[in-house]
Amino acid sequence: MLPLAGITVVSLEQAVAAPFATRQLADLGARVIKVERPGAGDFARDYDRTVHGDSSYFVWLNRGKESIELDIKDPGDRQVLDTIVGAADVVVQNLAPGAAARLGLDAATLRASRPELVHCSISGYGPQGPYRAKKAYDLLVQCETGLVMATGTPEAPSKAGVSVADIATGMYAYSGILTALLQRATQGAGATVEVAMIDALGEWMVQPAYHAAYGGSETRRTTAKHPSISPYGPYQAGDGNRVFVGVQNDREWARLCHEVLGRPDLVDDPRFAHNPERVVNDDLIGPLIESAFATLDADRAVELLDRAGIACARLRRPVELLTHPQLVARDRWREVRTPGGVVEAMLPPVTIAGQEQVMGDVPRLGEHNESLRAEFGGAREEVTA
């Protein structure tokens, strides 16, 4: 049995953060019932049409779930929802601020009669404070927590290339739900779990905030280079491809100079002897590395760096993830069915010896209407009569 077999999760979810959390639970064997708006569904279904006609976001976030269309303001549909919630171990919601309470789907209401219930609310800015009713989307939270101003070029700040605020929030919701289920197993009571996007991404931004506050200077934007370690960034090889080099300490700098650059004289050069000096003179280091790489293709440069024990990587395009040699060698891809066809889906990052996590189908909107209504409340015509 998978770890969460027998656990039922009901999620009133939209977009990325909550679906990301509940997909992790589905992968671990939980039954996840996704409640969607009739005729429209989770609006992430319409973000794009790139995966066999479906949204790349939705396909990524919603495998292994059951989809039911419910109008939760309709008395009959609300009866179905209440019956499903009554059988659930976990309720997850990321409705608009205040909506869950108005609908009687908040933790206080649901857990009053069922204290064993685990209830998780995901919001942008938390339930109190001046921002509590403010709309919060991923990029907006990246702005509010300082990530955008810490990313990009010296001339132009930039967003992260993925929905990092949503992903951070989803992971904290996932771990919070697991913690609450463990508490229930050992202590008998469920829990009220709250996760705010500003808290989740804010946690990730504490180090640069400390660096700026206690270092007395604003965070530098250094493109793909590390702002406080050098050399730590991308360098062009002779074939036009780029190799990312990460030197962590003075010993590695010495090996880089001796074994890759062929410049042992640089080891004790006062401009480069220690990391603080290398950071100050980073603009001089780049040409030295690219001069040594000029006669090498990227594969050969990586080979020399690996041999010298210098951390390095190829700068790959996102599409190359699907054919990455390390992932292929470790058999990390599985076929998953979507409404429009089959896709390659990556196994969840956590592996459990002797078990393979569920890689269920991605549901079409309302795919499980009939079966779930039969189980929890009958056909729509019956419950709305």
Image: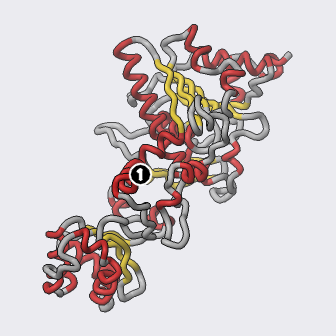
Residue bearing the label numbered 1? 209
Taking depth in this image into account, of 156 and 200 the one nearest to the observer is 156
* Type of amino acid at the residue the image marks with label 1: Ala
Taking depth in this image into account, of 323 and 19 the one nearest to the observer is 19
Residue 135 percent coordinates (x, y): 67, 42
Which residue ends up furthest to the bottom in the rendered image?
A: 295
- Label 1 crowd bin: few (<14), some (14–19), many (20+), radius 10 Å: some
Which residue ends up furthest to the right in the rendered image?
A: 385
Q: Residue at x 47, y 38 (%)?
A: 24
Q: Is residue 217 above or below residue 235?
A: above
Picture quarter with the N terminus: top left
Left or right? Give the position of 117 relative to 226: right
Q: Residue at x 50, y 11 (%)?
A: 115
Residue 317 percent coordinates (x, y): 48, 69
Left or right? Give the position of 41 relative to 202: right
Q: Is residue 256 visible?
A: yes
